[in-house]
Image (cartoon, rainbow, N blue to C red):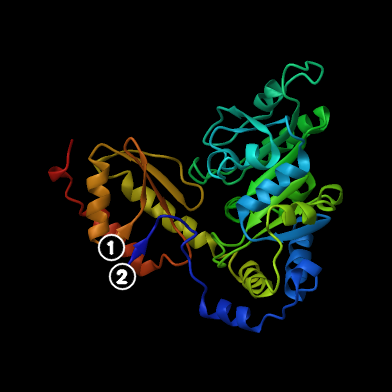
Amino acid sequence: MRIDLRSDTVTKPTAAMMEAITKAEVGDDVYKEDPTVNKLEEKLAGMFGMDAALFFPTGSMANQAAIKLHTQPGEQLIADKYAHVYNYEGGGVSFNSGVSCKLLDGNRGMVTASQVEEAINPPDFYHSPLTSLVCLENTTNKGGGACYDVEEIIKIHLVCKKHNLGLHLDGARLWNALVAKNEDPKQYGEIFDTISVCLSKGLGSPMGSVLLGKQRFMDKAIRVRKVLGGGMRQIGFMAGAGLYAVENHISRLTEDHKKAKEIGALLKTLDFVTKVEPIETNIIIFNVNIDEQLFLKDMEENNVHFYSMGQGKLRLVTHYDYTYEMHERFLQLLQNYPVHSVLK
């Protein structure tokens, strides 16, 4: 039994999702003639109260398209130092849009309205890049699945409105935040100019993200997607998987959160664990005072797989394919881990 806790991207389609894939009605989406894609886009735009939506092959492409929609070359965006758009999208901010990043030292990947306002470059000081966009991430990846307080997001929105800045949300794991905090997606549609949501993480679809936005941005989104190489043909098969995921897999995210918290509770009792970061959703980040590489190797020998973030920090992610049987097995392995042989 392989227990893969590297990421929630490792899930595979369920039998019911495979049936949805095979039965999907398809057309040529470049001509906007794929009925299943159109249905998915309409559904998500409606859920968030946004004007329009556009299906993308990946979350990174959706984020990069949003940045390009909001900015001009030479301008600057504001984001937390942990932001996915800065750390994990291959330098796309500079390569695709010619934009620089001003990085803020937030709390577990989350920034405040006062931090954002202080970071805005004076628009009349031509020596500095023009600040044009703020990018937030909810939940935060490197922040361990932390969820923003929506009241703070509203304050950031007001700062952006005051200074005429765009506001984009990297919502790759926004579904987790919505479930964990019992929030209404329409709340986010009212706050943000653009939002990307992922279908292939916690929801378990094989691929796909959707960019949602106000009409003035989305009118240009399909052209930007084409420039980035994201025009797709009979992609309704994958949109069918996404539709099934949205309709059936959102509420069950509570199971992933519950398992993550149970892992965290056990980790706190283990002598070789020095710190467990707060757990709100499905990501667990913890520190150990033993040889982390040997620990990972020992776990791999028991067919358990997860990552080191370096310097004694490790990350686990629960997901749809992490069953209760796997969960009990992993908890048992942790409980019985022989730390005496690998103490530094």
Inspect the image, locate mark 2, and give the three-letter code of the amino acid beneath it.
Met
Residue at horizontal 82%, vertical 51%? 220
Q: Nearer the viewer, residue 81 or 185?
A: 81
Is residue 192 shown to the viewer in this render? no
Label pair 2/1, CB-CB below 8 angstroms: yes
In the picture, the quarter occupied by the C terminus is top left
Q: How many marks?
A: 2
Q: Quadrant of residue 161?
A: top right
Task: Name the amino acid type tagged 1.
Answer: Asn
126 left or right, relative to 59: right
Distance of mark 2 from mark 1, alpha carbons?
7 Å
Residue 81 in the image, given as x and y percentages of width and height: 55, 32
User: Mark 1, residues whose alpha carbon is within 10 Å: few (<14), some, or many (≥20)?
Assistant: few
Across and down, in percent, residue 142 comes to: 49, 41
The one of 67 and 80 positioned closer to us in this rendering: 67
Secondary structure at badge 2 equals loop
- Tell me if 60 is positioned left or right of 306 in this view: right
The answer to whether residue 94 is visible is yes
Picture quarter containing residue 313? top left
Q: Please determine whether, in this image, residue 337 is positioned above or below residue 31.
A: above
Q: Residues within 10 Å of mark 2 (few under 14, many from 20)?
A: few
Badge number at residue 317: none
Q: SS class of the residue under badge 1?
A: loop
Image quadrant occupied by the N terminus = bottom left
Kindly identify the residue that appears in the image at 60 percent across and 51 percent down: 177
Per the image, the residue denoted by label 1 is 303
The picture places residue 166, in percent across and down from the top left corner, at 77, 37
- Earlier in the chain: of badge 2 and badge 1, it is 2
**x, y (%) of residue 218?**
81, 52
Which label belongs to residue 1? 2
Horizontal arrangement in the rendering, residue 246 relative to residue 258 (left or right): right
